[in-house]
Image (cartoon, rainbow, N blue to C red):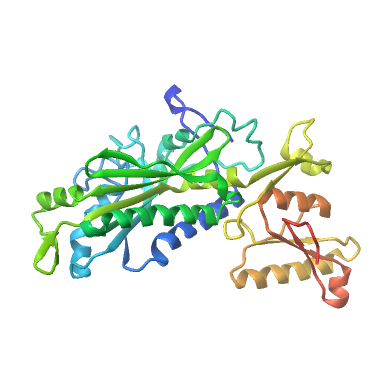
Amino acid sequence: MRVRNRNRGKFSSYTFGPAGVLTSRNLNQLLWDSLVTSQIDTYPVENSVFRNTDEPKQLRSNLSQGTLKHLPDILQLVNYTLPFAIVQRGQTFPESLATQYDDKFLFDSSVQTSIVLQYFCSPSSALQSFDLSILFSSVQTSIVLQYFCSPSSALQSFDQWIQQRLLWWRKYASDPAQISCSELETLNENTSRAFIQCQFPWGQDNVEEIISRGSNPVSDLQETTKVKLQCANGNKSYTPHLIECSTVLEHCLMACLCDAYTESTAQLGKKIYLLRYSAGTNHKIKLNLHPKIAPYKLSIVSSSKSRSNEIQEVASYLNKDLRNAGIDVFHAKDSLSVEDQFIRNDMMGLPYTAILSEGTLDSGTIELRNKDTTLKV
């Protein structure tokens, strides 16, 4: 991973390759499913990237304020019935970039979303001195969920959201024991927060914040808009309490890669060796990504040289058929040996490899290799 510090006059630069784009997309979808699709009474919204549409020169640094502005409309939609949630996903900008851009800010190289993901480097070396806060120096994809509930259920709901988010992180982790929750921190009499934490090569770092903000944000919005935002329980009215979960996609991706990364000593083929490391390195790398996060679910390789043209036709047909079924397939047309392709697939975190041979042409059988067990069936 290449990181440049903007504080020294250079901007941070991160780049996605094909596998990085797909891994990010899969993780993004899993986040969305957990916060929106699988939740009842949850409403997605979207705002402009500008803080104030009347002053289109200031970019937003978070999603919280823009999301909260949708509360009056959503309250009417649900007939002032609690609980419910509002979710927003979008780009946010650090304070250093969020002010005084001209009308062509989208074409300025310093505000492009560019996150560099290079799988094949060792945490013990390349990431040893890295810090997750560096990712804050570039444009990031944030997602925030604002959950509104009654004051009487606020404490229980806060605990439930902490447990729910912790379970989600552990569900997709290679080593769930490395995912933990920080101690509850009380900021003031109305505000408490906790963090989901992951283990990185530089130590534990926060990847998601769950915060109970009390009723103050809603009260402040009511004062500003002069719109009634109170709900009723019988003859008693109350101001909704706000619980907020927020994270950054790029931080989630970094956490997943560091969690999935393993290496072991192995004798590697020359071509893979040249793709990965400088001279003298003989470590085999594997990404133990959850199958739902892995960039491709299946790789297709050929073990026959004598009837390669026929096998390639079968591979192309299989590739197209699986993709039409919604399965991402990796089919590289290169000259690597079968074993070297296995190594590369393990490095990319691909769970399965389909091996086409002359037997495939003669009897229609295909061997399937499992990344975790390396067994072929």
Residue found 32% across the figure and 57% down from its top:
157
State which quadrant residue 81 falls in: bottom left
Give x and y (percent) for residue 270: 83, 41
Q: Is residue 132 left or right of residue 236?
A: right
Eyeballing the image, is 359 above or below 205? Answer: below
Residue furthest to the bottom: 363
State whether residue 46 appears in this view.
Answer: no
> Horizontal placement of 86 versus 258: left or right?
left
Q: Position of residue 302 (x, y in %)?
A: 81, 61
x and y percentages locating residue 320 in the rendered image? 66, 70
Location of the N terminus (image quadrant): top right
Residue 261 as seen in the image, left or right of residue 300: left
Residue shown at 14%/50% (left/top)?
Answer: 219
Q: Residue at x 20, y 64 (%)?
A: 75
Measured along the vertical axis of the image, is residue 375 above or below residue 2? below
Residue 98 as seen in the image, left or right of residue 110:
left
Vertical order, 270 against 10 (above or below)? below
- Identify the residue at horizontal 34%, vertical 32% (top origin): 96
Residue 178 in view here? yes
**Total numbered badges shown on the rendered structure:** 0
Name the quadrant containing residue 112: top left
In the rendered image, the quadrant that contains the C terminus is bottom right
User: Could you say which is closer to the camera, residue 43 or residue 269?
Assistant: 43
Residue 229 location in percent, x, y? 14, 59
Please identify the residue farthest to the top as the structure is shown.
Answer: 8
Q: Nearer the viewer, residue 112 or 41?
A: 41
